[in-house]
Image (tube, rainbow, N blue to C red):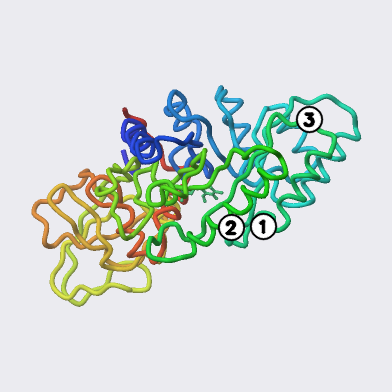
Amino acid sequence: MGIRARIDLAALRGNFAVLRRAAPGSHAFAVVKADAYGHGALRVAKSLSGVADGFAVARLGEAMELRDGGIERPILLLEGVSGDDELVVALAAGLDLVVHEPGQIAMFRRLAAGGAHHPPPIVWLKADTGMNRLGFRPEAVLEARSQLLACGVALQDLRLMTHLARADEPGVDTTKAQLARLTSIVTAWQHQAGSRPVVSIGNSAGALLWPAGQGDWIRPGIALYGVAPSAERGSAESGLTPVMTLSTEVIALREVPRGETVGYGGAWQAARDSKIAILAAGYADGLPRHLPSGAPVAFRTGRAPLAGRVSMDMIAVDVTDLPAVAVGERAVLWGEGLPVEEVAGWAGTIAYELLCAVAPRVPREYVG
Ligand SMILES: Cc1ncc(COP(=O)(O)O)c(C=O)c1O
């Protein structure tokens, strides 16, 4: 059966419930961009459609996949639209739009000048409170608000959002500073508008670790998939369960005499007579090529270390110390029994990158 990613939808819903309990006063956009971090956006969205208040994606194509697939809840376009044509499509699809820079306000003005009727959208004005990536600087937010209100396009609601740069690090002051800037913006907005805006703040880390960093709408991604958003608080401690288990099959077993090498570049040398299992998983499936020798793979009888370079379709694993590994046996690359965070640590990256990189050729099997 080769490599496959089993996606546990019951675990996904359990993780959503953890977030709900952590932020009981907030609505929640489930973040399903990048094909739901490799888990399959439409399947994930359908599984959460009875519980999540909305979904968030980065790009218009991702939003349309959900709408065309029958998702009727709010869908937030986190980067907003990138052209006049996209704006027309997004409005027709009833998407919630982020506006993070003046060019997007100009798109609204041109649309109004065209005179056509469009369903009034919910617009989320993005404030850059310290991330320095997207958004209006605090002192420019109210002017952007005025311009949007004057652009000639009717809005269903104009809301406020920001994104936290270091919410996964409970010890640093950056988040407090970002929240203080946001509070000042809200106060000034209230002064100008006469009422407080609906606000969206926290990603997974914000929602789980910073009660003041939740806001009216949280936007969790990684925690939905069972990964703890902070290295300082593990997933089990957070009550999260891995959703994806990437596993594959032993396709060959070899006896490698002491002194011989395994794989491309002879990068691993047998320090003793060794038993090597060849597994059907490679960088074309999404395993990082730079995953080093020693990285763990979980077999039925225990863990064993990667031996030599990851090739396109295969890896070699030193199973000398494991009893009775057999051809056809399955082994876990990450997921149940081997947290993806741990493998990411070996690869010098983060769980997000590993999950998103699982290749389209890997079959997803949905359970729960
Ligand atoms: C604006 C925004 N909100 C929310 C999220 C979800 O973040 P996380 O997966 O850390 O919960 C992201 C992800 O990168 C994002 O860019």
Distance from Cα at disc 1 to Cα at disc 2: 7 Å
Classify the position of the N terminus by image quarter: top left
Question: Most extreme residue toward the left, as rendered?
Answer: 323
Per the image, the residue denoted by label 1 is 138
The answer to whether any part of residue 132 appears in the image is yes
User: In the displayed structure, would residue 156 be above or below residue 151?
Assistant: above
Amino acid of disc 2:
Arg
Distance from Cα at disc 3 to Cα at disc 1: 24 Å
Q: Residues within 10 Å of mark 1 (few under 14, many from 20)?
A: some
Tell which of 130 and 253 is nearer to you.
Answer: 130
Secondary structure, mark 3, is loop
Q: Residue at x 58, y 62 (%)?
A: 130
The answer to whether any part of residue 250 appears in the image is no
Per the image, the residue denoted by label 3 is 154
Q: Residue at x 62, y 40 (%)?
A: 196
Amino acid of disc 1:
Pro
Q: Which mark is residue 181?
A: 2
